[in-house]
Image: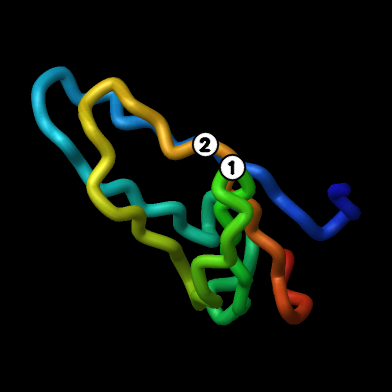
């Protein structure tokens, strides 16, 4: 269940021909860059790690998505 501090993101590679990595910056979530956040692959039910400032995906095939990443701040840092 999501509480008020969890964010779900779907990251999609819209590139026409090649695999890409995608970076989710805390700025786009309106979080302070020093915020630490736990990242979880909800689909795989697996914690990935804790990151500060941004999260960069592995390679995502063209027109594919990495869906259901949950970002949970571990300390207050929302702007």
- In this view, the residue in front, 12 or 44, is 44
Q: Are marks 2 and 1 in contact (CB under 8 Å)?
A: yes
- Tell me the SS state at disc 2: strand
Location of residue 74 in the rendering, given as x and y in whole percent from the top left corner? 72, 78
Question: Which residue shows up at 35% across the image and 59% down it?
Answer: 56
Dividing the picture into quarters, in which one does residue 73 lie? bottom right
Viewed as shown, does residue 60 lie left or right of 38?
Answer: left
Question: Which residue shows up at 78% across the image and 77% down it?
Answer: 76
Name the residue carrying label 1: 43
Q: Could you classify mark 1 by the number of other residues whose Cα lies within 10 Å: few (under 14), some (14-19), or many (20 or more)?
A: few
- In this view, the residue in front, 4 or 19, is 19
Location of residue 12 in the rendering, given as x and y in whole percent from the top left corner? 39, 31
As displayed, is residue 79 above or below residue 57?
A: below
- Tell me the SS state at disc 1: loop
Name the residue carrying label 2: 67
Give the total of numbered labels.
2
């Amino acid at each position: 269940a999501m509480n008020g501090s969890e964010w779900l993101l779907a990251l999609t590679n819209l590139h026409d021909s090649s695999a890409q990595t995608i970076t989710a910056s805390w700025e786009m979530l309106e979080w302070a860059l020093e915020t630490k956040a736990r990242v979880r692959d909800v689909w795989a039910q697996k914690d990935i790690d804790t990151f500060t400032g941004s999260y960069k995906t592995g390679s995502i095939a063209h027109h594919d998505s990495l869906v259901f990443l949950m970002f949970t701040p571990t300390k207050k840092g929302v702007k």
